[in-house]
Image: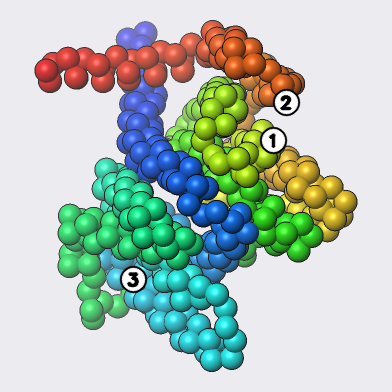
Amino acid sequence: MHNSFTSMEQTAQDNSQNRTSKFLRDLGIYAVGNLGSKIITFMMIPLYTYFVEQPADYGYYDICLTVIFLLMPIITLQLRDGSFRFLLVAKDDVERSKIITMVYRTLMVSIVFTIATVIAINLFTHIAYLWHTLALLIAMSLQEVVSQVVRGLGKNKEFVAIGIISALGIGLFSVLFVAFMGMGIEGIFLANIVARLTSLTIIESRVHTITRFLKRNLDTQETFIKILKYTLPLLPGSLCWWVTGSSDRWFIQEYIGLDSNGVYAIALRFSSILQTLAIIYYQAWQETAILQYDSKDRDSFFSKMFNNYIYILSIVFIAFCFLLKINYNWLVDKQYQGSLWYIYPLALSATLFAVSAFFDMGYQCAKDTKRTLPAILLPATLNVGLNFALVPQWGIRGILTNSIITYLVLVSYRWYDMKRYFKLSFFRRTLLPLTMILLSAVPYYFDCTIWQDLLFLALALGLLLYSCPQGVKDDVGKKVLNKFKGLFHAT
């Protein structure tokens, strides 16, 4: 009996180590792709601020980009989420062919309808950069869906390669079109369009999703109904997400002006780096959570991952804010440097968003996507109401205050709603990183010297790393050690 119990205990331990190892492996793959692409995008910010002389011009481009993010879920019908979710658990190539054929057919029909609609609009009114916006909308929609198809097929390296190739292309073409040819905003549009289409062409030549899985006469009606039943409830939620995360640009344009929107947009570009780091975790956790949802120790495993995530977020948050503060003077042109004071609250909003995304796994794991709507409708409604109330009086400070309140409400709602899917335990030690995040606002807004900022950064990170759960240190340490051993043997 004792031997049997010991064997069962060892098996459970091995399973825990295997899934943790897989999670860290996926985390590393997604980190390479997302960080690589985001670093290149990050390098474009100084280029744009120096060669796009008028903040109002960049503000208009940001408005166009905001419209694209609004329309993408409608055009794609959230097929990016459906394709990954169903391909991940597809049993054979026949089922994969049905999914991919249905997804590509539906996307093409939607794109044709969108082009026809824009042609009709153009007959009655003139909108600056309308065709550039349409082309970028199509390119981004294709990239979103195809990349998730590739990911659903288990081609994680190719999935991250799409982002890296796309970002490299954006960087190279931006230098060509914006810096050398002086095309301004039009150059930014063209760089993004050409780079995204190029990345898709290269990846398709490697993965062959069209030639291998796209079948002309395949009956996909049943698959169509099944996937749309999953994705369509996500569509209103995506629109609400847009209201929560992007409608602030319209309020800034209306009450403050395009110049302020251009400055604010730069701060958002920087805070998107923090969101990218959260997305890395989210993508790795998404796959792990779906596959582990039916495990017997689900609640304890999910609780461990959640509390560890808070530690990781706090370390990233503090390092991000203070390293950016120390280097901001040379990163952006003078007329954009006022955006530094927006970074901390935007980073805090991004952190709260990352926490809420962790809870989103409950809806996806249980395929209960219809419950995402009330979870998003509440903060979206609150966001619009607070913008009307705060922006006319407080300006951008009202936008920033609203963003933090909105995401706090979202986290609170989802924490409560997730109890129907899994039960998370909040560990007492997790209070430390939360406290450090809040206390870091004091030195951030003080007019400190670089050495004082570096001193606080070193003390804060040292304390968080020292108090970090031993499991995180062991798992990450083993992973890093194995990487170094691999490099040593390779040489």
Q: Which residue is mark 2?
A: 445
Task: Check disc 3 and report its element: helix, strand or loop.
Answer: helix
What is the quadrant of the N terminus in the image? Answer: top left
Query: In the rendered structure, are the residues bearing label 1 and label 2 in contact, judged by CB atoms less than 8 Å apart?
Result: yes
Tag nearer the camera, 3 or 1: 1
Tag 3 and tag 1, C-beta contact below 8 Å: no
Q: Nearer the viewer, residue 235 or 142?
A: 142
Earlier sequence position, callout 3 versus callout 2: 3
| Residue bearing the label numbered 3 | 104
Residue found 27% across the figure and 43% down from its top: 157
Q: Position of residue 28 (x, y in %)?
A: 35, 31
Instruction: Provide the residue designation for mark 1.
Output: 341
Q: Position of residue 302 (x, y in %)?
A: 53, 31
Q: Is residue 369 left or right of residue 397?
A: left
Report the residue at 60% width, 40% height from top. 334
In the image: residue 354, left or right of residue 164: right
Residue type highlighted by circle 3: Tyr
